[in-house]
């Protein structure tokens, strides 16, 4: 459990570093933004799919023995 928490922390720090350097996470093509008057609806479809793929690969790597 401790090893998993360390890896999750490193992944979160890496994502934060990439976003600081200008990687457009959350603004990918396929993320939908709808603005109507004072209402804004944001649906991050492409970002969700990318996050799912990355997390699946990380979990497959961690659970493989």
Image (spheres, rainbow, N blue to C red):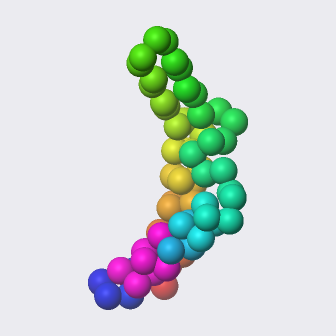
Q: Residue at x 43, y 75 (%)?
A: 8
Q: Pick the residue in front: 42 or 61.
A: 42
Q: Residue at x 40, y 84 (%)?
A: 6
Is residue 7 one of those drawn in magenta?
yes
Figure quadrant of residue 57: bottom right
Residue 26 vs residue 1, the one in the foreground: 26
In this image, 31 relative to 55: left or right?
A: right
In this view of the protein, can residue 60 be seen by the observer? no
Q: Residue furthest left?
A: 1
Tell me if residue 44 comes above or below residue 37 in the rendering: below
Q: What x and y, as percent, mark residue 11?
A: 51, 73
Question: Is 21 one of the magenta-colored residues?
Answer: no
Q: Is residue 23 above or below residue 16?
A: above
Residue that appears at 52% across and 44% down? 48
Give coordinates of residue 12: x percent, y percent.
48, 70
Identify which residue is drawn at 45% across, 25% down. Answer: 41
Quadrant of the image containing the N terminus: bottom left
Residue extending furthest toward the front: 38
In the image, residue 11 sits, relative to residue 57, either above or below, namely: below
Residue 45 vs 53, above or below: the answer is: above
Give the magenta-colored segment's residue range: 5-12
């Amino acid at each position: 459990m401790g090893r998993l928490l360390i890896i999750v922390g490193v992944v979160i720090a890496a994502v934060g570093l990439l976003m600081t350097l200008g990687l457009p996470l959350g603004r990918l093509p396929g993320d939908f933004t709808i603005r109507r008057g004072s209402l804004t609806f944001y649906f991050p479809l492409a970002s969700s799919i990318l996050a799912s793929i990355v997390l699946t690969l990380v979990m497959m790597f961690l659970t493989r023995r």
